[in-house]
Every structure is written in C-alpha cells, then in structure tokens.
Image: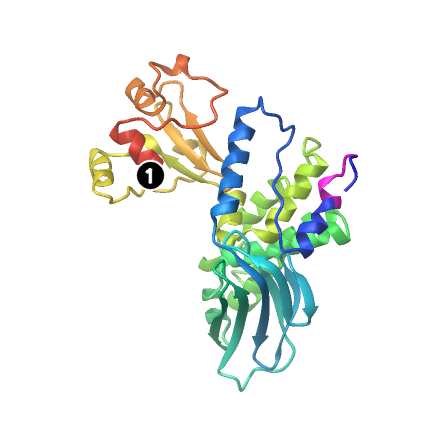
Amino acid sequence: MSSRYSDLSTIACIAKFSSGQISYYPDFHLGNVTLKRRFEKNLEHYFTRRVGFEAVMRIRCTQGLALHTFHGNFFVRSTDLLSLPNVNPDMSYAFNMVIEENMKDVGIVCVQAALLYTSSQGERRIRVHTLALPVTDKFSELYSACNVTAIVGLLGKMAVDRVMSASLGDAREALVNAVVDATKMYRTTMLSSTQQRLFCLPQSLQLLPLFVLAMLKNPAFSLSPKVTLDYRAHVMNLFKTVPLDLIITYVYPKLYGVHNLTEKDLEDTKENQFAKLPILQLNSQFLTRQGVYIMDAGMVVYIWIAKAAPEHLITQLFDVASYEDLSEDKSFLPALDNPLSETVHVF
C-alpha cells in the first residue's frame, strides 16, 4: 500500500477476499487511553482466539431449493463452495435461499454446511452441520416458526448490499418495505376482512418493526451528517461479518440495572453462581434518578450513573467518594475487592 491515506471502503476488499476482518480506531494516538486499551485488548484477543486455516466450506440443500447471495468475508470458488483462508469464532456467514420447485410432496428439506480446515495444531479436520426443516402449507405454522433475529440479521446484510449497489435511500426504503410487506401478507392470509384495517403481526414477528426502526437509526443506515464515510464503512462491514447475536445487540442494546442486584446475587457470585439481571426496555420510564445502569451495545459497553445514585454504589464500583468525583474520561471499570465490583466484572 502507498503511504498516502486510503479510506476504509477502499481497503475493505483486502479483508473481504482473505477472510479477514477490519478494526476501526478513529484519530488513534497513544495519548488516547480509551483507544489504546481497546487496541491492546483486541490485539490480545486476535492472537489468543481459536482459529482454523486453509478452510473451504461447501453448502448443500435439498433438490428444489437453491442458494444465492452469500454474505461474509470469503472467496467464492463455485456456486456452493467458499474458500476461507482462516476461520474463527468472530466471523459469521449467511446466504439467501429460494424455492425453485414445488415442494408440495416433500415432507422435510435439509441444509448442510461442511467445513474442512486445518487446526492450529496442524490437524486436518472436517465439521458438518445439518439442519432439517419441515415443509408446511399452513401459514399459521409458517408464522409461528419465524425467527425474528435471523430475519433482522439477513435484512441488515441485504441492506448493506443495497447501499453498495444502489444508494443509502434505497436501502432504507427496502428495510421499511420489508415490514410493510410482512404486515400486508399477514393481514391478507391470516385475518378476516374486518380485522385487516388493524396493524397486526404474529407473535414471532412483533419485534420486527422495532428492530428495523433501530437499524434505520444505526450509523450504517442513518442519514445523519455526523456519520463519517469511514465509520459507515466500518459498521456496514460489521453487519456483513460479525455473529448474529452481536449484531442484534449492536442494533438494539441490552440495558441492565446494577442497582437491582440483591444481597443474594452478590452471595451467589462468591459461589460461582453468576447473577442474571433482567434486561430492561430502552425506555425512559425504566430509568430512575437513583440508578446505575450498564448498557451492552455490542461493540462497546456504557455505564450510566444517575446524579442521585447512592454513594455506596459509586464507591464500591469506582472507588470514589461521590458522584462529583467521577471522571468523564474514565474508560474502564476498576476491579475492586468488594462483592458488588466482583459481581459486575463477572457479569
């Protein structure tokens, strides 16, 4: 590469075809403690994670089905064979599947993914996953089996492709149309004529509008002028490559109330029975003036401390006397010798 600046969207193809990944550190310099610690942690994870080399993956499906539009970082050798110079737990792969023939007389369809790779010990291994799915002609069974997180993940990948091939506006419109089409089809197939005026979705898809609205506000598809080109390219690459659970958390973060931890939760941590805090809705009515909250946004974790939070909680978590002593530049949570700090770190 030349010594001149290259934007992220230009060099992303290197990671795309080498089965690599991109990390983004805007305005990086050693004086930025937050970015420095993030870089150190990411580099440590990169060298210590499990990895396979010289891999190829073949995906097969039942006759009558066809695969197209693979998503992820790889090189396509043929219609069903992917070349992966390396595989690791931080990457994911997806594909679109279409029905080409009438499946009326087929009871079950199967999809199989076979991965051949070399382990870090030099052993050549093969790993096979097979998924069998029933075929139905009843819309009620179809809707009840919908996986909204998988749908949202694939919609995000397809929207990224739409941005690259058309425009950001077209991608946003396609996301909205996905919700509109799902609602219209459900009303047409499942509701009576008197109910079709209602905005209805099946139980399995009731969170679809929420997730799509969250995606429209995500930096990958937001119209905000504050989103830089490099940052948008970085986030779009995340949509295409990272595991599904991480993308869902990045689209719609998880909020936990640390102040809701009970004495039993703290005792359970000592006995290696980790506390399970309930996930709060991202709504102001669930926030209190005396609360301390952790928000897992997928790529980063935020800690929000209300101004009237109890001083003993602040002391046990941050080792300072009061709210006024907290530093806004603090980028990590200190590990202190008390039950609350230990529980939060384990959590």
Q: Read off the magenta span.
A: 4-10
Q: Where is residue 290 in the image (x, y as percent from the top left)?
A: 34, 23
Q: Is residue 5 magenta?
A: yes
Q: Position of residue 28 (x, y in %)?
A: 63, 29
Residue 206 position (above or below residue 61): above
Reading the image, the residue beneath label 1 is: 346
Q: In which quarter of the image is residue 258?
A: top left
Number of callouts in the render? 1
Residue 73 position (above or below residue 300): below
Extreme residue in the front direction: 122
Q: Quadrant of residue 82?
A: bottom right
Instruction: Locate the N terminus by quadrant.
Output: top right
Colour pattern of the rendering? rainbow
The secondary element bearing badge 1 is classed as: helix
Looking at the image, residue 310 sits to the left or right of residue 175; the answer is left
Asked whether the viewer can see residue 197, the reply is no
Residue 278 position (above or below residue 106): above
Mark 1 nearby-residue class (10 Å; few <14, some 14–19, many ≥20) = few
Q: Does the magenta stretch include residue 306?
A: no
Instruction: Locate the C terminus by quadrant.
Output: top left
Q: Which residue occupies 65% across, 42% down?
A: 234
Residue 346 position (above or below residue 19): above
Looking at the image, residue 306 sits to the left or right of residue 187; the answer is left
Asked whether the viewer can see residue 80, the reply is yes
Q: Position of residue 273 (x, y in %)?
A: 24, 45
User: What amino acid is labelled 1 in the image?
Assistant: Val
Q: Which residue occupies 58% across, 71% down?
A: 59
Q: Position of residue 199 (x, y in %)?
A: 54, 54
Q: Which residue occupies 61% across, 64% down?
A: 95
Extreme residue in the bottom direction: 105
Frontmost residue, 261 versus 187: 261
